[in-house]
DNA sequence: GATGAATGAGTCTTCATTCAT
DNA sequence: GATGAATGAAGACTCATTCAT
């Protein structure tokens, strides 16, 4: 078997096991048993267990990075929201399709190795930075309200991670609905939009029975 | 030294180490060295390493659970948003104050033990359920737009986790600003509120230059 | 509580546990828990676990030694068999009454400590020597056939041990029947006595149907 | 080295050490040091220390079981005593040749593990049952006196064990003499055969000078 | 290339014993 | 005398990695 084919074979089996049992509970013995190769053979193709894991992780990271495109502004470019939606769609559909990889990335991804941990963190930071850029752009375009876009971007990232993790865990939830909900939520939050700009509702009406829409959201919008 | 004092001492040191190195890279030797006790002493107070870790985790989980109160609706109750803010404030200030515990909960919290993993997941699910209840309540009160509140609740939870993790990592960011940003983001999303209800902007204007506010958010609000 | 009373209390509980679990599986923790004393108190009364065990063992050994009397020959002395029977009766009734001690002596009595093992062996050797003396006496008196009385004595000792062990294990079997069987067996073996001296049966008739009594036992009695 | 060879090598060394020091005082370190292998290698061939010991024990048990044949009755079959003698010869010569194994079986064989203890007891019970069958057969054939053959069989078993143990310990004593003595003793006991059937001696003469043959054995033969 | 036997550092855990209070 | 917290040596077992065949 040729080098790449062999590597692929081992990677394929390893993914499953890592996803199921996590990094530490997975032994080389598990992997070679599944892959049907000898102990020594494993080390012919991978420096060590950690490198194998890293490679799997790298794969997801690359895939995902490739699926997140910078928003383009300008005549002839699609609607910004469309671009966002397309990004999300690509990312979420990959994540939900490659359940095993997703699980590895979302759950078993910390505490092995300082270096590896940092790589994963760096990946997320990169994603957050992309999101932040989009937000900053939106602010410039007066589409996005002024706010701490760094915090916002992590909130968005975290929301995506958690929703995808949940969807992956439960197995239900279509990619489309997940994407739409994330998008809606990210853009508009939970409030009914009508309530957000009513001229007659504001901080002034704050007290009272606590049920007025204005007193609910008003103060948040400075 | 008396039982409770000794336990506390060991717990205190263990927290630090677990937070710094994670569960697997921390060994009993590390803990006893830090705590300045003998090997046997450790096992006098804790069944084993796992049990110690579990206890630390349980502590955070209890603390947090106690800090999240159900929203109360009715005359004489504070504004719902105020209640949300208070919850967030209690949670976030605890998390940012107890940095070590936070790190343990947010990062090193998976892949030890199926049982332990499940406990943590159950905790998050409980929190998500609380959030969802509040959202459902909001929907009923016509304050929250109709949507899949389960997904929403996980998005909110994820947002909080990620922002707190980031804030904890970076060390900057005041509790107040973190809370306000999360609250704003959760309630209103990223969009400028004015854009959300303009009567003359809607799905119809979807195509085109991709820059119009309506074409940006309109389609999301069906 | 006075020294001797305390010792006795601990010894009493320890016996039970040693009998049930053997020396190695019994911990000091078990003993003090049962005896209701503190860890340190244990070491106030016994040098260590081994010494405690040794003391228990010594107790049995002394009791048994006292119950085995030398056969006395001479006018006015009871029948030799009666003396044997009386010895056996005293020994066996003690062993079956003190089931726990018996179990310790018979089962858990080797492999701790070279020294302890040797003490036990020495005890058995002493018993065997006593038996051998009786046999030698019997030979002198022409009551016992000439043979290797050392081997004989160990055979008898072993027989007693095994039968008592079995009786102790099963719980049935009266002391009397055990004693009678041992005695009968020791003195006469298994053969029907008539067969042993019939003049017309002997080695000569050896071949044939393999069932003749002479051909069965004859050759043994040269 | 190939699997079977390595196992055999480890078993060989382990036997010696177990025999010398007993189960508990023998540790894995001893065994691997003797066998000249690394710690991990040990666990490549044996699940754990207990399993290794069990295997050694099993080996003796199997060997011995194979050496004890059921007595066959019928025309053309060898004399029953000859068959007994052959059984004993096979068993005793194995036990005295494999001194180490014998020591393990006879001395260090209790108190590890309830399960292991029970296996050993079961083995002895099996042997006792075999002996009892032979005795019952003898009774039927009117060669063996009526008696409690279960007790008898344990007495015989115990006799063999103790004599072999002694012979193994002392190192003197030929297999042949051991076998003959056991056989003689088992069949005829210690009494001079002439004394057993003299018509003029019986219970009636019980008292007296304690030296008369009849008063010695008579009462035993009811 | 492939194999799988061998390695040994690393960890956890137990438990008899000591000693300050 | 009594206590029980503290000790640490001892021992079992794991598993990633190496290397001779």
Image: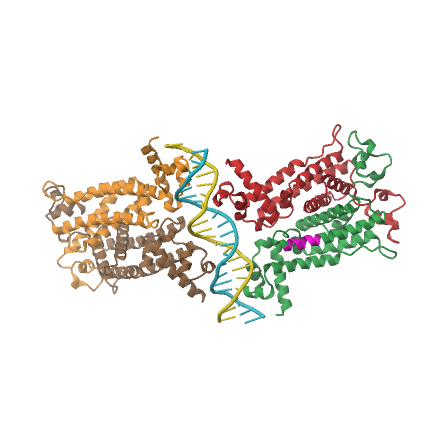
Chain colours: A green, B red, C orange, D brown, E cyan, F yellow
Question: Is the N terminus of chain A in the top left, top right, bottom left or bottom right quadrant?
Answer: bottom right
Q: Residue B39 placed where, x, y %?
A: 49, 45
The location of residue D189, given as percent across then percent down, is 20, 52
Residue D47 horizontal side relative to residue C1, left or right:
right
B87 in magenta: no
Give the answer, above or below, for where C3 lies relative to A164.
above
What is the chief secondary structure element of the magenta stretch? helix
Q: Is residue C111 visible?
A: yes
Which residue: 40% across, 61% down?
Answer: D35
In the current view of this chain or complex, which residue is farthest to the right?
B200
Of B214 and D81, the residue lying toward us? B214
Q: Where is residue C75, by image quadrant? A: top left
State which quadrant residue B221 falls in. top right
Residue A89 lies, in percent from the top left, at: 76, 54
Outermost residue on the top side: it is B76
Asked whether A121 falls inside the magenta stretch, the response is: yes
Please give left or right for residue A34 compared with residue A212 in the image.
left
Asked whether, in this view, residue C125 is left or right of residue A217, the answer is left
Tell me if residue C9 comes above or below residue A116 in the rendering.
above
Mark yes or no: residue A38 visible: no
Count the labels in the image. Answer: 0
Q: Nearer the viewer, residue B127 or A141?
A: A141
Over which residues does the magenta segment extend? Answer: A115-124
Give residue A196's position: percent from left, percent from top.
83, 39
For the C terminus of chain A, the image quarter is top right
In the picture, measured across the screen, residue D84 lies left or right of residue B151, that is left
């Amino acid at each position: 078997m040729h080098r790449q084919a062999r590597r692929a074979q081992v990677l394929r089996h390893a993914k499953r096991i890592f996803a199921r049992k996590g990094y530490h509970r997975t032994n080389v013995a598990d992997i070679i048993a599944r892959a049907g190769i000898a102990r020594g053979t494993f080390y012919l193709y991978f420096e060590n267990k950690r490198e194998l894991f890293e490679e799997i992780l790298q794969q997801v990271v690359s895939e995902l990075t490739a699926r997140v495109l910078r928003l383009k502004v300008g005549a002839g470019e699609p609607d910004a929201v469309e671009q966002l939606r397309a990004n999300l769609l690509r990312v979420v559909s990959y994540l939900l399709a490659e359940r095993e990889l997703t699980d590895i990335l979302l759950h078993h991804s910390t505490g092995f190795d300082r270096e590896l941990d940092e790589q994963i963190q760096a990946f997320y930071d990169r994603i957050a930075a992309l999101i932040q850029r989009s937000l900053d752009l939106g602010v410039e375009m007066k589409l996005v309200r002024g706010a701490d876009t760094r915090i916002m971007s992590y909130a968005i990232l975290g929301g995506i991670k958690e929703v995808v993790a949940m969807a992956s865990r439960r197995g239900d939830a279509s990619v489309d609905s997940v994407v739409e909900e994330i998008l809606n939520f990210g853009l508009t939050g939970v409030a009914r939009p009508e309530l957000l700009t009513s001229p007659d509702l504001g901080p002034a009406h704050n007290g009272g029975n606590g049920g007025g829409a204005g007193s609910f959201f008003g103060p948040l919008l400075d």
